[in-house]
Amino acid sequence: METQASNKTLHGVLAEFRNPKELLNAAETVNKNGYTDYDTFSPFPIHGMDKAMSLKKSKLGWIVFGHGLFGFFGGLAMITFMSVIDYPLNISGKTLWNVPAWIPVLFELTILFSAFGAVFGMFWLNGLPRFNHPLFNSERFKRATDDGFFLCIEASDPQFETEKVGQLLKNAGASAIEEVYDEEDEA
Amino acid sequence: MSKTYEYVHEPTLVKGDHDFKSITALITDINLRPTPKAWYAAFGVANLLLLVMLVSIAYLIWEGTGIWGLNTPANWGWAIVNFVWWVGIGHAGTLISAILFLFRQNWRTAINRFAEAMTIFAVMCAGIFPAIHVGRIWVIYWVFPLPNQMAMWPNFTSPLLWDVFAVGTYFTVSTLFWYVGLVPDLATVRDRIKNGIGKKLYGIFSLGWRGSNRQWWTYEKSYMILAGLATPLVLSVHSVVSFDFAVSVIPGWHTTIFPPYFVAGAIFSGFAMVLTLMIICRKIYKLEEIMTIDHMEKMNIILLVTGMMVGFAYLMEVFIAWYGGVEYEKAIFALRASGPYAWAYWLMIGCNVLSPQFFWVKKFRRHIGLTFVISIIVNIGMWFERFVIAVTSLSTDFLPSSWGYYTPTLWDVLTYVGTFGLFFTFFLLFLRFLPMVAVAEVKNVMPQADPHNYDEEGNYIAPKVEVPEPKRES
Amino acid sequence: MATDSPKLTDSVEFPSELNVTKVLFGVGTAGLIASGVGYFLNHEQFFFSWLTSFNYFTSIALGALLLVMIHHITRSSWGVVIRRIIESFSSNLWLWAIFFIPVIIGMTTLYSWTDPSYYIDDPIVAGKQPYLNEPFYIVRAILYFAIWGWLGYKLHKVSIEMDRTNDWGLTTLLRKISAPGILIVALTLAFASFDWLMSLDAHWFSTMFGVYYFAMGFQALFAVLILLAFWLRRRGVLENTISQSHIHDLGSWFWAFTIFYAYIAFSQFLLIYYANISEEVLWFYHRMEGSWIFIGYTLIIGRFLIPFLLLINRDSKHNKKLLTISAVLVLIVHFLEMYWIAMPALHSQGISFSWMDVTTMIGLGGIFLGLFFRTYAKNNLVPVNDPKLSDSLAKSYHQ
């Protein structure tokens, strides 16, 4: 047991709460106490949690906008090259720069790339995919995708002290508290 | 002024006495239970039909498009009708997930997953038809802007190429949207499943989702943006499909109302299809408390609205055909209503414009049997709408000496019937292995999810609406 | 929300010192008189200017009528706090019919199809006689205004009644009126647009034209609502009631219908441009000839590109400055578009602005807004007893 424990590093303290309201209040308390490396876990997004945690505005919008611009202007460049420069063809007597007729394709490319930006940008910002996480070692944490409401203060927080954090969460109304370890490979 | 009206309460979205845990169990247990025998039976039938489709396509590739009933002047027949029909059905899913999301119609959560899955499979069925219609399918890659030995590029001013981009983008974005919605629910199944291989697979596809609020934060933003992107996309796809017809100079095809009219028709048929499938599934999987009669009623209202939009477009077409004074245009509408295909035209009017009229009455909107019947009638009507458009305009074109009556062959029919096999094969797999209702989203719209609905001690208090006593004056 | 449902904190009475009705009526009357003088100087120009300005405001009022009904049938809560504004616009449609009279008087000047010598040699226009003839045109216009006027008036009246009686059952009545109402307005609006604008060129036709007319008016309506909301708030009216989240919703609708407008206008153009058949393409040809093309480009840039790009960011949908710029721009371009649709029938050689374009706009605009303020100021500024009011007030802006 002793040797095993030495292989483990503390990930953080996980506390469970009974309902969204208590979690919201707890997050507010933790935030007010100046912690930075903490997060709440719930089966669905809770309204007002962003304010309680003072989260910053997401950068995702700009990522999507950049991708959209790429889709539009990239598409424009491609069509111009193919239909005007490389192999000009007179089609129904219209000008080679038949822009109105290009709009559908340009529109679709803009949307396509913006959507790539929105989905893969979100994965990237969220650190996904990630196939393991110390929290998955907690049996209780499985309920975070069902009906559990959790808050975890991580050991990497500059203010982190196991005792103090545990007390804080208990005072905030946690119904259960446990320490979560990052298990390292025996090999 | 003596008549008084009753206030109609807004229905709650989830019926019965549910909490978060029971919702999770209600939906994901379907995936975790052993496979029912009936499922195997249904899957077997679907596979047989799929085989029919594969054989029909194989024979088509071997023999050529001559096996279909196409002949000059009607060079577009069932294949194009089926394409437009399937792609139209594929519009409801993204509409429900995107547009209703932006309009904050929370009732969408019960059916969006389901409808999105239907969308993706319907678009797959649709995509087959133009692909095999090209004749030489082995050079289908010419539709993509890839360098080739002829040093030629696709024609970017061709509506058929627009289709490639539109349907391709639509399929990709719908799938991504669907998958993004699935991630938190896959994590739910991952955390509940016992079995080894399943656990690994759900683990891989849920990408390590933890439901952390920092994740939800970006996730919600992403979902919102995707909805914002999918909304114009959904309008564009069927508009582009309508351009296939409308940029031509064929009478009956070239009319400016086509884009919005096709979009309305697509939503109409898509909702009908969702209703058909929903009425069956809610019964079989006992989801009546999530997919409620109130949902059905709301969808019936949308059916009525879009049906009227389609009716509006029919009227505009006929009126302007007369008003415009162009001989050919007038002739084609006269022929539609009284010519050799008049039966199809009146069938279309009956199914699409008349049958939804039942839904003006609340009692009918809430009648499951009637809704089921009408939802099927609507899809028959929408198939005939595309048939009327594609076939009447071509078979009686500018040159009366070449007029002919278009009839499909057995292979036309078999290919079409076979696509149902493809559709249901995928749909059954979806029902079996993926949560068919968006678990996280349903929880999110339950009153228990709102922190305001708890008192100081943290006890849940259900919100109540009290109707005030009206002050009645003489 | 069960525990702390928000209450209305602002006064729902229009501050009397703010009452601009008289000023607006004064300005409007002056504009009308000036335009009346114009009639004697150049009656052709007068009638065309009048028709342009009349459609400018009518399209907005019809947008308001549809929005009220959409609001009722969808039972939406976001807009309850601004619903009275929309209702006040559409409630005056029956009075607004008066201003259609000059169009009837000027019919023979405006519409070439009224002239027998014109269509005698033109079998196509002659074929339209069963529809395009003077008596039927007038009957139709009366019918349109009777329907719109009744709907607008009734919806407003019932809503006011609910303020007084606190009877929530009336929401059911409002929905019962709205459901068929939308259908009837959609149809009459389409035919009205055919009658009033499309038939200026007796040859041209487009099945989309009704939808196009709606798309223009609806977009412009949101521009008007945004500007009004800012104006009210700056004057301290409904300051805490119309919150940032309502502005955001208005901004989102405005942006969405900017895209919708572009979609409809572009589709109509693309189909006609692409097929390039003479019976249709001439309409666009005339509108891209000479200096008219400049307005054509202004429409794309001013009505779509600039508002689209300015408001694409989520935060800018409640940014006062950006919204104001976009709204003002759209309202200007809305005029240019009406002008671009109607005026080439008179000035086929190129743009030729007249002072009467301005006076009819001032005249009709003054009366239009005057009527609005008269109705709006007379009643509670928000539907105080609406079941959805507290939901609407509780809306807070996320992210």
Image (cartoon, coloured by chain):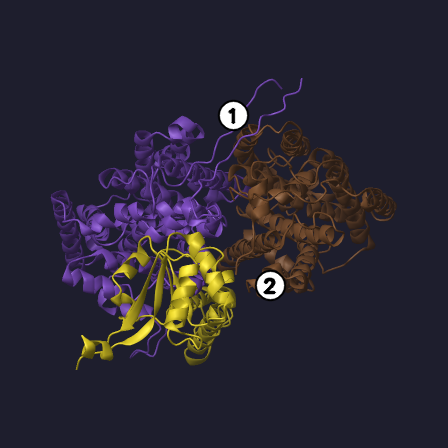
Chain colours: A yellow, B purple, C brown
Q: Are marks 1 and 2 on the same chain?
A: no
- Give me the C-alpha separation between circle 1 and circle 2: 42 Å
Residue picked out by circle 1: B6
Q: Residue A107's x, y, as percent?
A: 46, 64
Q: Amino acid at mark 1?
A: Glu
Residue A54 makes an appearance in the image = no
**Residue farthest toward the bottom in the current orientation of the protein:** A187
Image quarter (top left, top right, bottom left or bottom right) of the C terminus of chain B: top right
Residue B213 position by quadrant: bottom left
Q: Is residue B370 above or below residue B155?
A: above
Q: Is residue C48 above or below residue A100?
A: above
Q: Is residue C293 left or right of residue A41?
A: right
Q: Is residue C5 left or right of residue B176?
A: right
Q: Nearer the viewer, residue C291 or B271?
A: B271
Q: Residue C220's x, y, as percent?
A: 64, 51
Chain letter belonging to callout 2: C
Residue C159 makes an appearance in the image = yes
> Quick one: label 1, few (<14), some, or many (20+) residues within 10 Å?
few
Residue B140 position by quadrant: bottom left
Q: Amino acid at mark 2?
A: Ser
Q: Residue at x 17, y 57 (%)?
A: B194
User: SS for tag 1?
Assistant: loop
